[in-house]
Image (tube, rainbow, N blue to C red):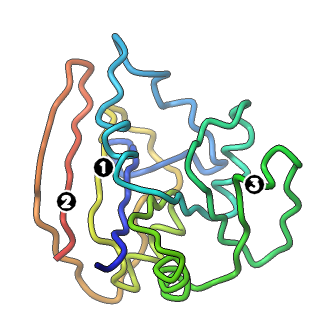
Amino acid sequence: MPIKVSVYIAASLDGFIARKDGGLDWLPAGGEGGEDFGYAEFMSTIDHIVMGRNTFEKVLTFGSWHYDKKVIVLTSRDLTLSPELADKVEALHLSPRELTREMDIRGAKGIYLDGGVTIQRFLREGLVNEMTITTIPILIGAGLPLFGTLEKDIKLELIKSESFKNGFVQNKYKIL
């Protein structure tokens, strides 16, 4: 069975995943009443998290490490890891196609893609199977876009749409 590559991400209503400087101050803190918006269920379907270098460096600013899955950081530069992350994080310099092949060889079943550029690269290569996008009801006007330019259309099928009391709208799509 081929590896499943999934996106699970929040975006502003105007399509940004962060401010131009990478700031996430516009994202509400935590879920109301313990709501996780399907995150735990999603995480149970993956065994590796793949992110770009910028996203990894942003995650490091959050304080304690909160991933219990192996994290692969795609980077073309050397990455020095702290001893406490040495067995939790691996840096690789691979293309999206090379990475999916490597993960398949390792027996991975599901990859969670995180970070705008990484998501865009995998989408352009036709390697994303599904996307869960939670739209936050805020307009931030400018920032880092979830989607970049595409050479061709990417058709999607809506699998599920759910709205939450706090105004979040979460759509899950299958890539056709």
As rendered, which of 112 and 29 lies closer to the eye?
112
x, y percent for residue 125: 40, 86
Label 3 environment density (alpha carbons within 10 Å; few <14, some 14–19, many ≥20): few
Up the image or down, 31 lies above or below 79; here it is above
x, y percent for residue 173: 19, 59
Q: Residue at x 71, y 57 (%)?
A: 89
Contact between labelled residues 1 and 3, with CB atoms less than 8 Å apart: no
Q: Which residue is mark 1?
A: 133
Q: Which element is circle 3 on?
A: loop
- Disc 3 marks a residue whose amino acid type is Asp
Label 1 environment density (alpha carbons within 10 Å; few <14, some 14–19, many ≥20): some
x, y percent for residue 7: 38, 58
Q: Which mark is residue 87?
A: 3
- Disc 1 marks a residue whose amino acid type is Ile
x, y percent for residue 23: 62, 40
Q: Which mark is residue 173?
A: 2
Question: Which quadrant would residue 81 be assigned to in this image?
Answer: bottom right
- Disc 2 marks a residue whose amino acid type is Tyr
Contact between labelled residues 2 and 1, with CB atoms less than 8 Å apart: yes
Up the image or down, 85 lies above or below 137; here it is below
Question: First in sequence: mark 1 or mark 2?
Answer: 1
Quadrant containing the N terminus in the rendered view: bottom left
Question: First in sequence: mark 3 or mark 1?
Answer: 3
Question: Which quadrant would residue 77 be assigned to in this image?
Answer: bottom right
